[in-house]
Amino acid sequence: MGVMNQESNQNQTPSRFGRAFIALYNVFNFIGRFFKEAFLPPYEFKELMKQCYEIGYRSALLISTTGFITGLVFTKQSRPSLSEFGATSWLPSLVGIALLRTLAPLLTGLIAAGKVGSSIGAELGSMKVSEQIDAMEVSATNPFKFLVATRVLAATITMPILTFYTAMVGMLGALLNVSVNEGTSATTFFQSALESITFLDIIASTIKAILFGFTIAIVGCYQGYNSSKGTEGVGKAANSAVVTAMFLIFIEEVICVQIFSLFNS
Amino acid sequence: MESKPKTDLSTEKVIEIRNLNKAFGDYRVLESASLDLHKGENLVVLGKSGTGKSVLIKIIVGLLSPDSGHVNVLGQSIETISYADLLELRLRVGFSFQNSALYDSMTVRDNLEFPLVRNRRDMGRKEVDALVEEMLEAVGLLQAINQMPSELSGGQRKRIGIARTLMLKPEIMLYDEPTAGLDPITSKEINKLINDVQARYHTSAIIITHDLTCAKEVGNRVAMLVERRFDRQGTFDDIFNAGDAQAQPFFDYNFIR
């Protein structure tokens, strides 16, 4: 019976291969359900806005600090190598490309996996074990639409914004270092940094950020939504949400780099 | 303590369960279980913890699927119902959870509004507010309207849980252990509330409990879940005056005899 929970799976004890296959099937089913529920009315706009605020605005301070320090340290560490060849004037370009192509999306993704992924996993996990999700279900409300679709959409929308924000703050960190050491003006720094950035870099970064945001939220929601065994299960859901999302982000980064390098060559 | 009036068994059946089987792995919970709920009655389901009482009502609302057997709720067969029809059916069947299951991140007002604004989209703001206030008044907690669930006591949470269930004006109420974990005085208040709901909103109800005081105060009829079946059904006095070896320890423990 398709409409019921998948608890019927508990009635048999499948082999390890069988369990892995069922888990994979459930994951794809979950993703498929997201695409089915997220774009069909009724829409949960109020909850979507709330989640955008929670995921986006509430992560801004942490991301600002990390982005600024990364820009500053990256510039400081790169200077000695470039100065050996008398090429310190290339620092703005180097930092601009590194931040936008890889550092900003990856850094934002990893921070969001820790902060947002764990919070989604724990929140939904605790709602699951305290029967709040069942309570939505029995009041003829679609908890998937309210809890999962909104969080995944919010993360997917806010991650590109956060990524470009990280890149910008990182550039400010780099500017501080360059202007103190080289006396370069802000105008010259940004002109030089932005000249080397191509349209493809921006597209690639946006696609990666969308992909990372989707991954973080869908993993967090999946782990939380399917958690069991009381408070222990909530802890496991939060932990798995972070570990799995970080692992997937690295895999996606490698795949994206390979794909976009084909367009660059 | 007065027992409630007997159910008129000639009235319409709103829930019909026949030969229901449910197991979790090798652990069989229900086996050829059959039970009816008649219109307007409060049916108490008694049984030891872990015997499948909650499983029964979760099957009725489609949260769990039966392994085999037939469950008919308000004319709809649960085994073959489509998701759209199940949602429609859930509007007519209220479920009050053992731990209340209030939404932690929402105020009492938002908790009560939650099912209403999503299922009665034609209702205006004023109508929603009026209904929220009516239900909170019915459970005697109007003053808690802007409080968070964490600020409420166990008894208050149960009342708010019942009020939230009543928001959709269901025809059937399913109460899962309504007095579990409450002191005797608060339990008595909850029992009174269950009877008030029955009288005021003309609901039919299944009350899952192992509290015999609750069973006697709210039940028109009692069904005892023993060895995975409901072989013992009748009024409270029918069951506990019969000297049944399975029922008697229950009675003796609850009334300290």
Image: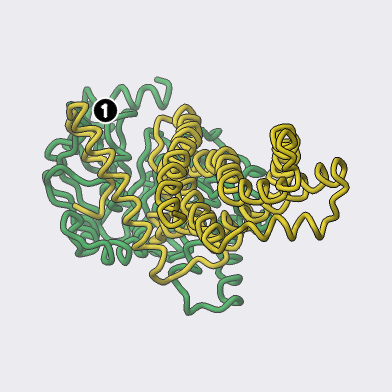
Mark 1 crowd level (few <14, some 14–19, many ≥20, 10 Å Cα):
some
Colour used to depict chain A in the structure image: yellow
- In x, y percent, where is residue A55? 60, 51
| Residue position marked by numbered label 1 in the rendering | B247
Q: Quadrant of the C terminus of chain B?
A: top left
Residue at image point 80% right, 58% down: A188
Residue A123 visible to the viewer: yes
Is residue B47 rendered to the left or right of residue B116? left
Q: Quadrant of the N terminus of chain B?
A: top left
Q: Chain of mark 1?
A: B
- The image shows residue B26, relative to residue B5, as above or below, that is above
B254 or A96: which is nearer to us? Answer: A96
B200 or B225: which is nearer to us? Answer: B225
- The image shows residue A77, relative to residue B20, as above or below, that is above
- In x, y percent, where is residue B87? 32, 63
- In x, y percent, where is residue B127? 56, 76
A244 or B194: which is nearer to us? Answer: A244
Q: Residue B197's quadrant in the figure?
A: bottom left
Colour used to depict chain B in the structure image: green
Residue at image point 37% right, 62% down: A37
Residue B179 visible to the viewer: no
Residue at image point 56% right, 43% down: A106
Residue at image point 44% right, 31% down: A233
A111 or B64: which is nearer to us? Answer: A111
Q: Amino acid at mark 1?
A: Ala
- In x, y percent, where is residue B82? 22, 63
